[in-house]
Amino acid sequence: MKLSKLFSITCIKVFFLCGALAFSAGTHADSASYTGQSRTFLWNPDFNDIVDTSQYKKDPPYVVGFSNAGVADGWLVTFKHGVEWAAAENRERIEKFIITDANWDADKQIRDIQDLLNQDIDILLVNPVTLEALDPVLRRTMRSDVPVVSVVRRVKSDEAFVSFVTASDTALARLSAQWMVETLGGSGKIVLLPGQAGASPAEFRLRAAKEVFGQYPDIEILSVQYTDWSPAKGKEVMATLIQAHGGEIDGVWADSGLQGSGSVEAFINAGVSGKDIPPHTGGDLNYMYQLAHEHGFPFCGIDYTAAIGIDGVRIALDVLEGEQVPTRFDLNFQVVIPEGHETTSIKADVWLRDYVRLDKPGELIMGHGLGEDYDPQTFTANYPR
Amino acid sequence: MKAVVVNFQRLGRARQWNISTIVLTVMIALTILIGTLVNSHFASWGNLSNILEQAAGLGFASIGQTLTILTGGIDLSIGMIISASTVFLAATVDGRDSLVWPMVIATLAMGTSIGIINGVVISRLKVHPLIVTLGMAAILEGCILLFTLKPTGSIPFWFEEFAWGRLNGIPIAALSMFVAFIGVALFLSRTGLGRSLYAYGDNIEAARLRGIPVNRVCVFVYATSGFFAALAGVYFVSRTGIGDPRIGVPFTLTSITPVIVGGTLLSGGKGGVIGTLFGVLLLSLIGNVLNHMNVSTSIQWVIQGLIILAAVSFYLRKGDK
């Protein structure tokens, strides 16, 4: 009886805490129409533990270390801007915010983390280069009583971090893949354009998408080509595939509009335009939304919201204040579909015409959470260095 | 007359070694001074031992590179041998205690074998080392990516001690690196084969005429380079707990930097591993100081590039090409 009561109280605490977190995440969404609880939290069949962080509680001001994997594309630039913006917003609680950039070198990131620890940081915020290689150094960091908040990517061991801040890669991929299957009526030849080989978001999304496509025997995957989340590489790869397969390509699943926009451009260059462009998936990049809006082809865009950096900093500060935090914090996302292209399973949270920013540059990363005037070219943040 | 020429050469080598060592010692001292002034956390034993520990991977990789450059060659397959070694070791061990040491030996043998192939092709087919090792790097990269696109395998936790452990407060990896450098330095100065590397690098035809088995020397040099690249791979498996197909990529070029900074000439015949050790320590120190100064990675690259240019200019001004 006592156990069941304890369980009920814990569940209620978890629900309200996560609800509060999701609400605060929603307050910095740009043109979001779905502002409810994160669906990946609500639909997650597993339990999400809440961590008591009282052992890490300290009086401000704090020294925060942020070890970033690298800045290789527009999404990562915007993500980093979010981290810097959140650090600036909390400058009264932060004495020093130290940022290192590993340039996608796992060995350098390990060195960076050792150098951050030597500067007596109170907490480590980390975007790991890979799921696996940072595991030993982060386990050691936790054992030295410096809490770790992992953002974007997690590492293998549960004991290597206090909290993992993410937007679900698997949900993003399954939803967009299911939309593709249903848009094609369960039958057709498709091309998969994942991001960077070996990067955990790309691999998770690809695996989740294949789970969906694998359930439909009449869906044939013509080719899987990694694109490094580069519009130029997406275009180059698709131009080659159009040469190889011609009009056989019925759909293109891209895990982001970064390379998805390149794919659409390749079709346009090949003389395919308007609604003849095969169905595409891929969010994040305003230009992808602009192309889908302009040409009217079937489209499903889901952002891996770059505002994740803002929530990473917030959770890190919560840990230092001894607040309870979830072991995994899922950010919300929007399903963006043009009118007339919803499917049985996948409905729009927001219509494409309401979401696309025709007044903003194509390189803008959507879901940035940095306000209406955000411009990645001119952004600066006055955070304590 | 011949003896006089040889003596002059030795004298020249000794002077070159001394000048580069003095310059590097001054630069290391300056870097430590700057680090101490800019950040109060810099001058601590904890940080110094971190720097030594962090230097080990680059140190192992650049020992082999020093030998190839001493002979007037270059090994651009080092990065991919490192990656292949990490993937091979972690994937074959896959967390099983009993397989660790046999597979470490097999990994070192694999790296050495790849080096032997490089050396045989270079010496027998007379193809430039740059082309051969670049080709080998491409072959290895393709094979690694055919096997796995992402980090794979695992090792028992105790094996992490090679990269992370301390012996009386000194990092085990750094101790291993120093032993390797001293061993190779003694080999180069005290053995006939070691001295023949300088003769090979000075003038291969003259070395051949003096009876030096140049083909064997070449195979030996690239085999040694492969061995040390594999040793760096073993270190990285210990450090990351995984076989990472990308971890060696930066070392294709960064393994050359400490060699040049350390005073070994790209044209071959002059230099040595002690200069390279100083180069490794200097570069590791600079990276650490810049991190403590909160300087971005992009600027760190610029500074590294400037150091290479300064080093090359310095040695050219000394009259060596």
Image (tube, helix red, strand yellow):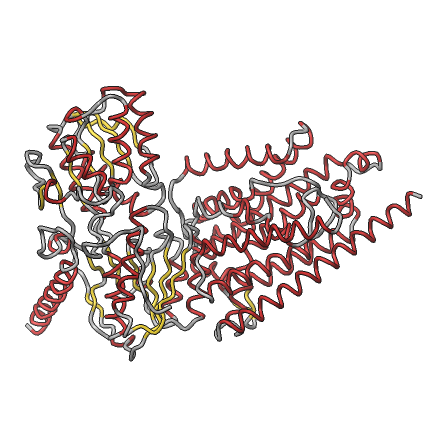
Identify the residue shown where x is 13% and y is 36%: A179
Pick the residue in front: A233 or B65. Answer: A233
Residue A4 image point, x, y percent = 8, 69
Residue A17 image point, x, y percent = 13, 66
Query: From this viewpoint, which residue is outermost toward the bottom?
Result: A59
Left or right placement of residue A78 versus residue B22 in this view: left
Left or right placement of residue A251 versus residue A125 in this view: left
Identify the residue shown where x is 37% and y is 64%: A139
The N terminus of chain B - image quarter: top right
Pick the residue in front: B52 or B269. Answer: B269
Identify the residue shown where x is 68% and y is 53%: B314
- Quarter location, residue A271: top left
Residue A124 image point, x, y percent = 35, 66
Residue A118, placed above or below residue A215: below
Left or right placement of residue B252 versus residue B216 in this view: left
Query: From this viewpoint, which residue is outermost toward the right?
Result: B1
- Quarter location, residue A316: bottom left
The C terminus of chain B - image quarter: top right
Pick the residue in front: B128 or B101. Answer: B128
Pick the residue in front: B174 or B266. Answer: B266
Residue A243, placed above or below residue B37: above
Residue A201, placed above or below residue A240: below
The number of discs equals 0
Residue B220 image point, x, y percent = 68, 41
